[in-house]
Image (spheres, rainbow, N blue to C red):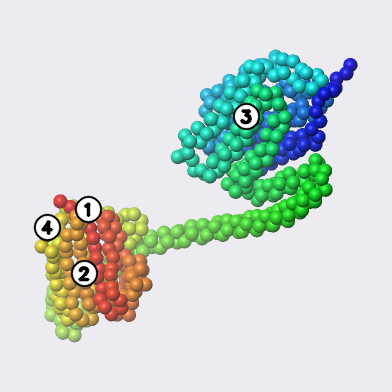
Amino acid sequence: MQNSCTGAIDYGSIIYYSHLIPLIITLILSVFVLFKSRFSLLSKIFFAFSLAFCLWLLGDVVAWASRDYNLISFFWASLDYLNILFFLLGAYFFAVLVRGNDIPIWEKGLLLVASLPAWVVTLTNNSITGFNQPWCEAFNNSFLTTYKIVIEFSVIAFIIAYTAWHYARIEKKKQILLVASGLVLFFTIFSITEYIASSTGIYEINLYSLFILPIFIGIIIYTIVNMNIFQIRLIGTQLMVYVLLVMVGSQFFFLENSTDQTLTVITLAIAVFLGYLLIRSSQREAQARIHIEELVVKLETANDKLQSLDQLKTEFLSLASHQLRSPLTAIKGYTSMLLEGSFGAMTMQQKEAVDRVFQSVQHLTKVVNDLLNVSKIEQGGMKYEKKSYDFGKSAHNVTEELTLVAKNKGLALSYEDDATGPYTIMGDEEKIRQVVLNLIDNSIKYTQAGNIWVRVAHVDHNVLLSVHDTGMGMSEEIKQSLFKKFARGDGGKVNTSGSGLGLYLAKEVVEAHEGKVWVESPGSGKGSTFYVELKGSK
């Protein structure tokens, strides 16, 4: 019995190029990402989508190239179902990519239900209704043809709508848009040519529509390599180069013109050279990334050790400060009693010596208190008892307390305000008072001659304190680091007894009250102005 077709047109090697090369590339790509991503959900769906499409390509190339109508009939019967299947799997792949996880069970159910009509028609051998033996052409089931076109355009609309619906919540927008563009481009051209072919009976249109497939494959490969869609990069770059070389080299199967063959040889040689450079560049990048990751691990380890040491240091300072407070309190108490004559009269020389001890103890007590406060802040144990009070009145009292200290150094210390009081704020009065005392005390210490002005004013709804002096001033560089722990700028040259913690504590306390503190100075030797701005309260 004669099974061959007598009137079929021979399309030559172009059929194999348009089908087998995309089939091989797609299969390699899908297997590659499946194994390299360790069988992740997304890679498994992509593999299923690619496999369905490869089966369709295989069946279609048999339908085009074979002359055995029994073989053609067998493969042709499953083409529409495979067509619908890879479209639905493409939609499933895209939905999981956008969501970042699997879709709900009811959405999977919809995809399954959408594939059932085609599956039933194919399974019952009704997908083709007849066969034109001389021309090797089957007559498709009209319902299945229409249903296939509906599914195709529904999937295209779904991809566009799904992208728009989830766009605001998508993290890697460029990645999603690239894949969506590739899918829509391929599916649209594929569907349009399918529709035209089924409407006109000119099935050769389908043959040329497959030439858009390399563009889609190129987009997917680009996305894999540059957007790291399956967490693959270096090997993905190599794969891209190899695929492009296969696509260029495969043209030799159907080129007959010597000029075209020469141009293809030149193109292939250039592609090999550029591919080699790209792979080497990717290898260097991968090695650099590994080196950076190793450095990051080392830095993280070192940082953990430093944090541990810093915590030990904080705990030590807290413990040492607590242990020092009791003896210092006793020394301060007894020296004060000695100076007051509680233990009898002292000679002038003895009194001067005890007074020096008393002043040193006072300074050491302040340092210990500063260290305790720093420990509390770093351990998150600093507590604030906030209440509403007149900040201007408190600043005025502190100024008066220090007036004698300034006078003994030959300085004029004065207080003024803008007469818009009361200057009510909500804060811890004692801790804010300590901030004001530190700022004025600093100005007294680092001003050799001249004046110190303390001023309080309303600025918008806030209260602004300024402490201006005619002291040593500071450079721009020192201003940047002045409020850090143990930072003293050039002040250490003038006053060696400071701890470098006063301004740091002032900054921490003010910021805990949602305020800000800063300093301005025209330069070294030109004086300074410290500012504290706090929220006003009615």
> Which residue is tagged 3?
191
**Residue receiving disc 4:** 422
Amino acid found under the numbered disc labelled 3: Ser
What is the distance, in whole Å, between disc 3 and disc 2 at their CAs?
Answer: 78 Å
141 or 282: nearer the eye?
141
**Residue that carries the numbered disc 2 in the rendered image:** 467
- Mark 2 near mark 1, Cβ–Cβ under 8 Å? no
Instruction: State the separation of the CA atoms marked 2 and 1.
Output: 25 Å
Q: Which of marks 4 and 1 is nearer the N terminus?
A: 1
Q: State which mark lies toward you, 3 or 2.
A: 3
- Confirm whether residue 428 shows in the render: no
Comes first in the chain, label 3 or label 2:
3
SS at mark 3 in the image: helix
From the top left corner, tell me how far across and down residue 299 is, in percent: 52, 59
Residue 257 position, x and y percent, is: 82, 45
SS for dot 1: loop
Which of discs 3 and 1 lies nearer the camera? The answer is: 3
* Distance from Cα at disc 4 to Cα at disc 1: 21 Å
